[in-house]
Amino acid sequence: MQRISDKINLPSLSRRRFENAHRVEINGKVVEPVPYLTLPFLSSDVRSYDITEGWRYSRNEHAIHGHRGHAGIDFAVPYGTPVVAPCSGFAISSYFSFPILEDSKELKLLDGKPIYFGLGYFVQIYNPEVQRFFQLGHLADIDPDIPFSLPVYESSADRWSPTKHDLLISEILNPRNANVVLVETGQPLGSVGYSGLRWGYDDYEEGSKRPVVIDPVGRVSWDEPHLHTSDYYRKNDGTRAPFAWRDGLSNYLTWSRYPTPNRQGKDTFIGPEPLYFISEETGLPIFADEI
């Protein structure tokens, strides 16, 4: 039997590692990577985009925060660009941010200011058709129609932890749950920013009922404006933990290998089983208003 990874060139990535990541086995059964996503933008809002980080962080990014695995894709577009739902499903939102520490446990500084990590303001969508979760992070704001669940501050760790992001599936599907709302592909979710990636300032105020609007001129992040996207399943045990993260473009490499409208060629590719719907004309993921 021909393996999926036999169909494509996988530079610097072993076939076994690709298959372990993409050919997900749950309860002893391989779950097929069925496409269900569009780009989380409208073609009328975004003429082009870049992918600045892929499944594995670039050397430059790793040097800043020390993390190697990204398990997502970063789409870079201008600050404030509208973000829409890439699929239909049940949405919640919250906030997540924590400080980066040195090996000595001291705050890691960049140009004399502490740096923070985390999804920031994010929206999470559960798509019942494929039973997957999809997260969109670092938003500058969240649309008023999306319920915002207040995060919890852990003073000992200077950490903001999200809430309602790990609801049981039965709770998510409960029509009386005020923390969840049904969204359709293309529905507004918020806008692109860099929340959570703080650089010596706060971007959430305790008790705020909605996200705090950050002035991108006065409060610049250590990272560029972008939208972090990631796909995963969730355990049904007591931990409710995410697992089986999948690369939406089935590439599993660093940013330079991902094709964009301005970066295509022999060194870039989309894998054979992307989770995004791919345009026959461009070979790239389609926008939410093109489906």
Image: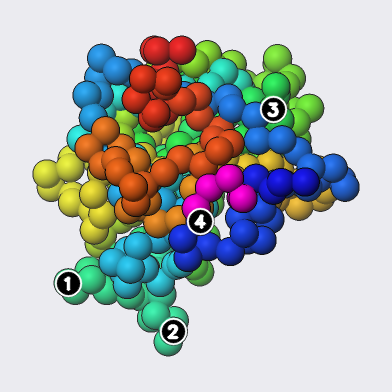
Q: CA distance from mark 2 to mark 4?
A: 34 Å
Residue 124 is covered by the magenta coloring: no
Task: Name the residue type under label 1.
Answer: Asp
Q: Is residue 143 left or right of residue 1?
A: left
Could you tell me if residue 217 is visible in this image?
A: yes
Side (left or right) of 190 relative to 232: left
**Foreground disc of the pair 4, 1:** 4
**Circle 2/circle 4 CB separation < 8 Å:** no
Query: First in sequence: mark 4 or mark 3?
Result: 4
Q: Secondary structure at mark 3?
A: loop
Res 10 label? 4
Residue name at image x 66 percent, y 61 percent: 16
Q: Which residue is mark 3?
A: 130
Identify which residue is drawn at 35% across, 75% down.
107
* Mark with earlier residue (1, 2): 2
Q: Is residue 51 visible?
A: no
> According to the image, label 2 marks what residue?
103
**Chain part drawn in magenta:** 5-9
Residue 212 rendering spot, x and y as whole percentages: 32, 37
| Residue 21 drawn at (x, y percent) | 64, 53
Q: How many residues crowd mark 1 within 10 Å: few (<14), some (14–19), many (20+)?
A: few
- Percent position of residue 163, x then y: 59, 42
